[in-house]
Amino acid sequence: MFTDTRTERPSLQQPLSFVGIGEGEKSLARLLWQLIAPHADRIIDDFYARVHDAQIMPRINQGTVERLKVRQAEHWAALFGSAFDEHYANSVRRIGIRHRDIALDPLWYVAGYMAMKIEMVNVIVATTLSPHEKGRMIKTLDKYVAIDMGLALSTYSASIVD
Ligand code: HEM
């Protein structure tokens, strides 16, 4: 997990400030989750169908997919809920560790996230929001995905060194 260089304590504040996640973005992210949540199952289903077709991880069975649908939706609720608390930190840590355990190449994680993010962008684009509001939502989504991917990958590489 990310460590504050001054206190040596785990902290999300510095990366959040760096990418520009403040109170405005947090409110937008909560709205964003209300838009995306009804589509989450479909987005995750399509994603694992794609993973299956590409033979990235042929041993993922339907039971695992059903479990991951719940886990991913819970994780995104925690992320976009914007508390950035211990609950979220543990969730992102588990993702890094689980992917490390199954030896998932980080390339697939990043490319996979990109595929799901595009589906989320499609949900935003299909709303009746103004172009300006859509732009703000998409920028907020980008910031959140960068933080989430970065933290999971930090855990991944830290747990390899451990
Ligand atoms: C090609 C890319 C990916 C593959 C093949 C993959 C595969 C897997 C597998 C096999 C597991 C373990 C399932 C189990 O518990 O038996 C897992 C866990 C998980 N993955 Fe991925 N994953 C990929 C990308 C992603 C992405 C982009 C996300 C986005 C957030 C994600 C979120 C999760 C979550 C939330 C868990 C559960 C962690 C927990 O135990 O709490 N995965 N993944």
Image (tube, rainbow, N blue to C red):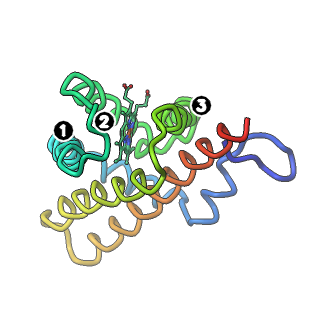
CB under 8 Å between discs 1 and 2: yes
Determine whether, in the image, residue 119 is placed left or right of residue 104.
left
Farthest residue toward the bottom? 131
Tag of residue 73: 2
- Looking at the rendered structure, the secondary structure element under dot 3 is helix
Determine whether, in the image, residue 45 is placed left or right of residue 146.
left
| Other-residue count near label 1 (Cα within 10 Å), few / some / many at <14 / 14–19 / ≥20 | some
- Looking at the rendered structure, the secondary structure element under dot 2 is helix
Tag 2: amino acid: Ala
Q: Earlier in the sequence, mark 3 or mark 2?
A: 2
| Other-residue count near label 3 (Cα within 10 Å), few / some / many at <14 / 14–19 / ≥20 | few
Tag 1: amino acid: Asp
From the Cβ of disc 3, is ligand 1 less than 8 Å away?
A: no
Residue 27 at x, y percent in the picture: 41, 53
Instruction: Pick the residue in front: 8 or 96.
Output: 96
When asked about the image quadrant of residue 104, the answer is: top left
Residue at mark 1: 41
